[in-house]
Amino acid sequence: MYAFSKSVKELRSSEIRDLMKLATRPDIISFAGGMPNNDLFPIEAIDEIYNNLDPKLKKTAFQYAPTQGYPRLVKSLRKFLKDKGLPVKNNKLLITTGSLQAINILTKEFIDPGDIVLTESPSFIGAISVFKSYQARMESIPVFEDGIDLGILRKKLESLPTLPKLLYITPNFHNPAGITYSSKKRKELLEFLANKDIIMIEDDAYGDLYFDEEIKDIVRPMKCDDPDDATICYTGSFSKILGPGFRLGWLLVNQEVYEKCELIKQAMDACSPNFTQVLANEFLEQGKIYPYLDMLRANYRKRRDLMNEALLKYMPNYVKWNVPRGGFYFWFEMPPKFNASEIMPIAIEKGAVFVSGKTFDPAGVKNNNFRMSFSNMGMDQIDKGVKIIAKSILEYESKLK
């Protein structure tokens, strides 16, 4: 018997990872993976970029990068973030191997076993896994259509024996809930955190994938209003806006936090892939990112609309959902007696798959919810797949009676 560490013993395979094995079956319509659409990757643009690189730069791409990141990418990304209003002048930028590494670095920096991390409920399964791996004590706060429940957050802080070290939130096009924090909720949350020694991780992996101009003004990062101190650590990613295969994310933090982050990253992997950093930089420097994002928004909005039309057509009236205004996800709530994991095998047998709610519950219990992603399958499969899921729910309901 191997003597695994205590932190490793806490790790479990997520339902999403297990369900991805089904995604390769041609007879399964998968709403499970939160993946970009393969047909939308900028393959021709990246081919053109690489083929036109100076030979010396190609050699640079094959080499190690500085831990902070390929210097030209750091510069071009700073400009990209500055255009969003982020305080790049007063903060340091670290290129990470995906935004999940950014969350991992921050957790390692601040969390000892038993320390309290506040999360939303539901929450991103990747972040939940990271917090578990560092043996954090997770305390969750419900999120509603306009964001985190501040009343419960206040009560939670009053009842806890020690002050939480971190608060982890996804305010823009939440994974999995699909919601976006309102301007009012953002302001109230920042006011609430003022003068409290709680670091907030603002995970903004989906903020560029908004579907209308009105919501564009709302999804302005909260870090924009936190220019000088460590209250907010901002994370982002190229995974949803360029391609997860690039394995590139970033951290924007103040100088003091950054110094430890860079040392932690050095110990983790020394540097992120320089090859993809060179390509990503050229994509930014040449201005290709902006028309590409416009194309992505239009395409994903069309997919969102197709799914919503199918949901309105097929879903039982006791299944509730909010229509996302960006991102990849619909989040569903069924009556309390329903169990999404028991509906799953019925749906798989009929030819479709989703992700059950307990996957995103930090406690791993609440299961009358489920998530469906509209991003990755063919548009001609959306109506058929939603119909299968709805029929599966109705069949499950008939067995409950």
Image: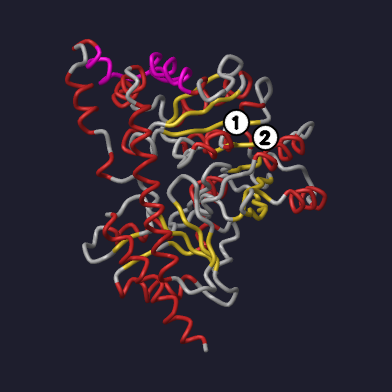
Q: Residue at x 44, y 76 (%)?
A: 393
In the rendering, at what x and y percent does residue 225 appear? 66, 27
On screen, residue 367 versus residue 274, left or right, reads: right
- The answer to whether residue 115 is left or right of residue 242 is right
| Quadrant housing residue 39 | top left
Q: How far from the left and from the top, in percent, is residue 267?
A: 47, 28
Q: Which mark is residue 233?
A: 1
Main secondary structure found in the magenta portion: helix
Mark 1: few, some, or many residues within 10 Å (few <14, many ≥20)? Answer: many
Q: Please say whether residue 5 is visible from this viewpoint.
A: no
- Tags 1 and 2 in contact by the CB under 8 Å rule? yes
Q: Magenta part of the protein: which range?
A: 57-80
The amino acid sitting under disc 2 is Ile
Q: Residue 2 at what x, y percent from top left?
A: 43, 55
Picture residue at 64% right of the left edge, 31% below the top: 232
Asked if residue 107 is positioned above or below residue 314 in the image, the reply reads above
Label placed on residue 199: 2
Q: Position of residue 293 (x, y in %)?
A: 37, 33
Q: Residues within 10 Å of mark 2 (few under 14, many from 20)?
A: some
Of callouts 1 and 2, which one flags the residue occurring earlier in the amino acid sequence? 2
In which quarter of the view is residue 47 placed?
Answer: top left
Mark 2, secondary structure of its residue: strand
Q: Secondary structure at mark 1?
A: strand
